[in-house]
Amino acid sequence: MTFLSPCTRALTGACIAMLLGTACGATTVTVTPSSSTSHAASPSAAPQAFAGTGFRTKVPAGWQDQTTNQTAVSSLGGSGTVLMLLASPDHGLVAVRTTPQPVADDQLAHYLTTVTPPGASGVSHAEPVDIDGRSGVLITYMVVPASGAAQENEAMVVNQAGNTYEILLSTAQAGFARDATGLQEILNSWTWA
């Protein structure tokens, strides 16, 4: 019998929760290797630069870059190309991917309703969001997996250079405020490349 480390178990659990928070139809995820300057999966004491396909940002202090962890990325499910996967100290996840097909600006809010998992509760109305000068929309919702605690999610989509970027935070309800602060740090340092 193989025993997984606590970090691996937590990441696997968070990935399962993330799977519940993404589109339920497609099963294959394509990973585009980033040129992240943080190749280690250990948390950093200070924010680290991250260069993804089409954007740059900073990984908050204490968070782990899991983008090159094929097991973690494969666990996400959903569709599209995963560009960044970050794990917070309390095992929340921020995933950034491009959608399989671009979504028209006037359809972004509708798109979010189509990828919100069945059974999600507390689904907010779409709200405007600005990411480095590009307008998009965001929603929040709750998912309670059959085998676990409630997961709070914040999903947003924005168009840039012919691509639709989907950014999703998924974390335990108890850690949502803390992880949302980390997501805000990521968005505040975000620039389009």
Image: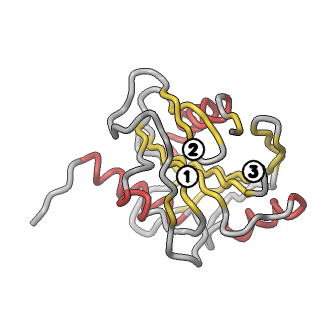
Residue neighbourhood size for the residue with mark 2, other residues' Cα within 10 Å, grouped as few (<14), some (14–19), many (≥20):
many
The answer for how far apart the CA atoms under marks 2 and 3 are is: 21 Å
Instruction: Name the kind of residue labelled 1 in the image.
Output: Leu
Q: Do the CB atoms of the residues marked 2 and 1 lie less than 8 Å apart? A: yes
- Identify the residue at image location x=47%, y=60%: 17
Q: Do the CB atoms of the residues marked 2 and 3 lie less than 8 Å apart? A: no
Residue identified by numbered label 3: 138
Tell me where residue 96 appears, x and y as whole percent: 59, 51
Q: Secondary structure at mark 1?
A: strand
Instruction: Name the kind of residue labelled 3 in the image.
Output: Leu
Quadrant for the C terminus in the image: top right
Residue neighbourhood size for the residue with mark 3, other residues' Cα within 10 Å, grouped as few (<14), some (14–19), many (≥20):
many
Q: Do the CB atoms of the residues marked 3 and 1 lie less than 8 Å apart? A: no
Q: Nearer the viewer, mark 2 or mark 3?
A: 2
Tell me where residue 5 appears, x and y as whole percent: 21, 49
Q: Earlier in the sequence, mark 3 or mark 1?
A: 1
Instruction: Name the kind of residue labelled 2 in the image.
Output: Gly
In the rendered view, would you say 79 is above or below 91? below
